[in-house]
Structures are given as C-alpha cells and as structure tokens.
Image: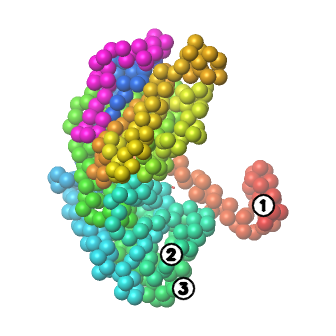
C-alpha cells in the first residue's frame, strides 16, 4: 500500500494543474464518476479525481473487504475495547444468524424491537399513559452525544411523518437547556426518556435528576409512570427507579454514535410510528447489502470514502463541508461531526504505531441556502480549498410551495457550478470580483427525504467512515480521546465550587479560576 500512496502523490503532482472543467470535457465523465443505489445518486465528477487516480485509490481500498466481512459477522474488530461492531445487526432484515462469542444475537435484537414497537404503539394510542390516565402529549429525551444526536437529527429530518407525541431533547449540562425545554411543558402530560448507554454520563445523570424533581413536584410518587430508559446498563437504570418494563437495553457491540437504529431511536419511533421506523431500518439494511455486495468500483460508501481520502491525504484539504439543501437536515452536520470525528480523529494505528499521514478531517456545515449568506464567501474566495458535499432531494413535502423547492434546487446546483467554474479576471474586471473556481464538490441527490432514504443516507456515511478508517489502519470504533476532559472536569469541580482554592491547576487555568471567583 505504501507504494500506492506515493504513486497517488506523484500522480497528483503531475495533474495538479489540470482543471476539473478540462476533465469534464469528457462527455462520459458524469456517468463514469457517479454511482447510484436505487434513487440515490452520488456524483463526484466535479472533483480532480481522474481514471488513473481512481484506479490507484481503489487499490488502497482492497484491504477493506476482509475487515468489512469481519465486522458484519461479529468479529471483535474494536480491539481496544474488545468488542464486536454490530450496529448493522439492529437493521438486519435477512435474519441470518449473527454470532457474538458463538451466540446468535438476532433473537435478542428482534425481541427488543418488538418491545419498542409495543411500547410506542401503547404510548401513541394512550394505553401507556400519564398518571391521570390521559395521553402523553410530549416526550423529552435526555441524553448526549450518540444518545442524543441521532434521534434529534432524525426526528427533525422526518417532521412530515410525525403523528405521535411532540418530542423534545435535552443534552447540555448547561441548566439553560433543561430549563428552557421543561418550562413550556406540562409534567402531567410528559414522558421522560433517559438515554445513556453507560448510565454514568454526568450531563445525562444531572439532567435526569433535574427532570425527575420536576416530575415529582407535580406528581409525587406517581412520577415513575412518566419515566422510561434506554441503556446498556439495565441494572443502573433500574436502580434509578425506572420500571424495568420501560427499560430498553442494547449491547456493548453497538457504539453510541451508531446507536440510533435500536432503543436510542425510541423518541424517533414515538414521533413517526413503528412502521415508518421499520422503513428507516430497511433503508439502512439496503445500503448495508449494497456495501457488502457491490464491487469496490461501484460501491457507493467505498467511492465516497475514496473521494474523502483523495481530498484529505492527496490534495491536503483538511476539512470538508456538509451542506444539506434541506432545512430539516439542519442537525445532519452535527450528527456527521460525531460520527466522523469521534470515529476517525485518531493518531495511532490499530497496532498502536503513530500514524504517518493525516486521519479524519474536520467536518462542519450548515444547511443551504442559509450558509450561502454566511460562510460561502470563504468557500468561494478564501485561501483554503474546502471540498463541499451537497445534499438535495428532487421532491419536497410541500407541493403548494414548489416554487421554493425549485429555487432551493437551483441554488444547490448553482453553488457547485460556481465552485467549479469560478470567474476569471478578464470577466471579473477586478481582483476582488475574481473567483478561482476549480473547487471540488460532490452532490448526493435522492427522490425525497423519507424514513427509507434517511436510513440509507446515514448507513452510507457510517460505512464511508469505516472505509476511511480502515485505509488509515485506525480503530474507528473507540473514543479514548474524550476521557481526559471528563477526568479533569471531575477534578476541576471542587476548585470551581470552593471559590478560594485553585488547587494545583496550571497557571493559566488558575488565573481563569481567580477571575471566575472575582466575577461570581
Ligand atoms: O463522551 C463521548 C461519549 O462517550 C460518546 O461516545 C457517547 O455517545 C456519549 O458520550 C454519551 O454516552 P452515554 O450514552 O453512555 O451517556
């Protein structure tokens, strides 16, 4: 593989002056540099990847197939945590056995899904109800990271499918969050879900305690009827006083940021109903099947990953922008930030050696068209090249507002074209009006943002992250980089509460603590 990396670098050096517009003179390029899975199209023709580069990139990906099969079959590929990686089992429709430590996990997955379905149906129909026998009108999910971002992103994305209770999300330890969410709700009508894989996360435990006090003040002992939990630590949830019939467990082979497909998706299922949730799983399963079966050169997650590797490692662009032209996907960039940066923000290989090339890029973004009026200036004329990932649906859910959708599509296509073409000085007349152009982008287009499409989209990006991680040789499924901050926060707390003792904090932090004491 070492040679392939240097061959790619040499090829880039040779071809760096070729503009993407020159590559696009080949009328077959769009077909050759795009791939479809059903109605979902990934177009990467507006990049500087040519046929030779793609050939070499595909060579880099040849290491992925064996690891992919190992992942799907339950091997413990998360070596630092000694865990299998089986979020795909949560959406496995083939019902073929999947073995972990010799035991088929599929019956357990199906049983949990069945319990989730029953619970959601009962809540939605008012059979599981508030202490005064009335329907729950509102659900508050308390969780953070993977126990928040998936359901919050997907619930917002699928707003046209909402026909259940209103869903709200509390994640931040900042008391403003829980305060602002609860202040408009009626505890008599609210179901609180405490979602934490470990059931130890300080933000979630603190917010959960505050919510329980809020419920207890209104309902006394009956507040327990208003609680449910989602966790891998079922005993810890029960110890919190939650009725075990309302505790939904999942296993350690589901990583937090990959957990929306199981019980962590409970608020989503409550909002859109079990059948739509099934469709969400089915969409993801179809992408899983494509990822397992399509040859590498037609494999959408593999090709998406290779575009990422080209931009990051070969062209040296350290960030990528996720730009959904869909207001309902406004939390998608944040979701992808966790998915990608927590998975691939690593500096050592699976064997512990220091990486010799860059791993995960910085992921950021906002929905279009809003971003156009905020940060696109830099994307078009700034000194850094930022590969952009545009997402757009052909159909909206607002047939009466078709003029809006046509403008949205026109803007999306215009932006990638402007990045590509630029405007030279002759036309621009003055340097500040000049656009360099030749800026790469990809576009993901699909019919409509249904549960099925969203499932496919998320699975696509999950597998992309996996493929990139494998090519770098890192473990994409642990997250040790979040530990130190957690430990130091615990150590810092007494220095914050005891306002005359900066303890053994470093001199800068001690200075900040002194100012904090003075301002308090
Ligand atoms: O701090 C990072 C993290 O561990 C994420 O990986 C995880 O999704 C999040 O915290 C929340 O963890 P939990 O679900 O255990 O509360």
Q: Nearer the viewer, mark 3 or mark 2?
A: 2
Q: Which residue is mark 2?
A: 185
Residue 493 location (% of width, % of height) = 67, 64
Give the SS element for disc 3. helix
Residue 305 location (% of width, % of height) = 38, 33
Q: CA distance from mark 2 to mark 1?
A: 33 Å
Could you say which quadrant of the image residue 391 lies in?
top left
Write the residue at 44% across / 64% down. Answer: 196
Residue 245 location (% of width, % of height) = 32, 77
Q: Which residue is mark 1?
A: 516
Q: Which residue is mark 3?
A: 217
Which span of residues is magenta-colored?
A: 13-41
Above or below for 494 versus 87:
below
Residue closest to the far right: 518
Above or below for 137 versus 95:
below
| Nearer the observer, 370 or 74 | 370
Q: CA distance from mark 3 to mark 1?
A: 33 Å
Count of picture labels: 3
Badge 2 density bin: few <14, some 14–19, many ≥20, Cα 10 Å = some
Give the SS element for disc 2. loop
Q: Quick check: can you spot residue 142?
A: yes
Give the SS element for disc 1. helix
Residue 237 location (% of width, % of height) = 42, 73
Name the disc covering residue 362, or none. Answer: none
């Amino acid at each position: 593989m070492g040679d392939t990396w240097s061959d790619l670098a040499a090829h880039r050096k040779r071809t760096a002056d070729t503009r993407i517009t020159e590559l696009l003179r080949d009328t077959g390029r769009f077909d050759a540099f795009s791939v479809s899975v059903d109605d979902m199209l990934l177009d990467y023709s507006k990049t500087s990847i040519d046929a030779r580069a793609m050939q070499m990139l595909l060579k880099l990906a040849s290491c992925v197939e064996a690891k992919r099969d190992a992942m799907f079959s339950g091997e413990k590929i998360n070596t630092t945590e000694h865990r299998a990686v089986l979020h795909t089992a949560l959406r496995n429709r083939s019902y073929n056995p999947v073995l972990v430590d010799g035991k088929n996990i599929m019956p357990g997955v199906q049983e949990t899904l069945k319990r989730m379905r029953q619970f959601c149906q009962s809540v939605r129909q008012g059979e599981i109800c508030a202490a005064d026998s009335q329907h729950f009108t509102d659900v508050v999910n308390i969780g953070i990271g993977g126990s928040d971002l998936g359901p919050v992103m997907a619930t917002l994305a699928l707003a046209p499918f909402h026909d259940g209770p209103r869903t709200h999300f509390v994640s931040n330890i900042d008391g403003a969050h829980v305060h602002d969410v609860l202040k408009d709700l009626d505890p008599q009508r609210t179901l609180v879900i405490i979602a934490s894989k470990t059931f130890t996360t300080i933000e979630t435990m603190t917010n959960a305690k505050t919510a329980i006090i809020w419920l207890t003040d209104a309902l006394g002992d009956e507040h327990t009827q208003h609680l449910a939990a989602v966790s891998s630590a079922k005993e810890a949830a029960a110890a919190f006083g939650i009725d075990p019939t309302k505790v939904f467990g999942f296993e350690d082979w589901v990583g937090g940021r990959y957990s929306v497909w199981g019980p962590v998706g409970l608020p989503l299922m409550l909002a859109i109903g079990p059948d739509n949730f099934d469709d969400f799983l089915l969409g993801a399963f179809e992408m899983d099947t494509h990822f397992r079966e399509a040859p590498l050169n037609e494999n959408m997650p593999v090709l998406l990953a290779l575009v990422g590797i080209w931009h990051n490692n070969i062209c040296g662009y350290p960030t990528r922008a996720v730009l959904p032209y869909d207001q309902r996907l406004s939390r998608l960039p944040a979701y992808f930030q966790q998915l990608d940066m927590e998975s691939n923000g690593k500096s050592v290989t699976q064997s512990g050696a220091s990486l010799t090339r860059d791993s995960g890029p910085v992921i950021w973004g906002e929905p279009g068209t809003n971003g156009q009026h905020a940060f696109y200036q830099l994307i078009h004329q700034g000194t850094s090249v930022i590969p952009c990932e545009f997402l757009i649906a052909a159909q909206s859910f607002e047939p009466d507002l078709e003029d809006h959708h046509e403008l949205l599509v026109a803007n999306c296509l215009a932006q990638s074209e402007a990045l590509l073409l630029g405007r030279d000085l002759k036309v621009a007349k003055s340097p500040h009006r000049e656009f360099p152009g030749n800026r790469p982008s990809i576009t993901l287009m699909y019919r409509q943002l249904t549960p099925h499409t969203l499932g496919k989209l998320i699975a696509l990006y999950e597998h992309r992250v996996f493929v990139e991680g494998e090519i770098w040789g890192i473990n994409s499924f642990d997250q040790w980089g979040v530990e130190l901050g957690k430990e130091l926060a615990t150590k810092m707390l007494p220095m914050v509460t005891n306002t005359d003792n900066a303890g053994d904090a470093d001199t800068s932090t001690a200075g900040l603590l002194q100012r904090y004491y003075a301002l308090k």
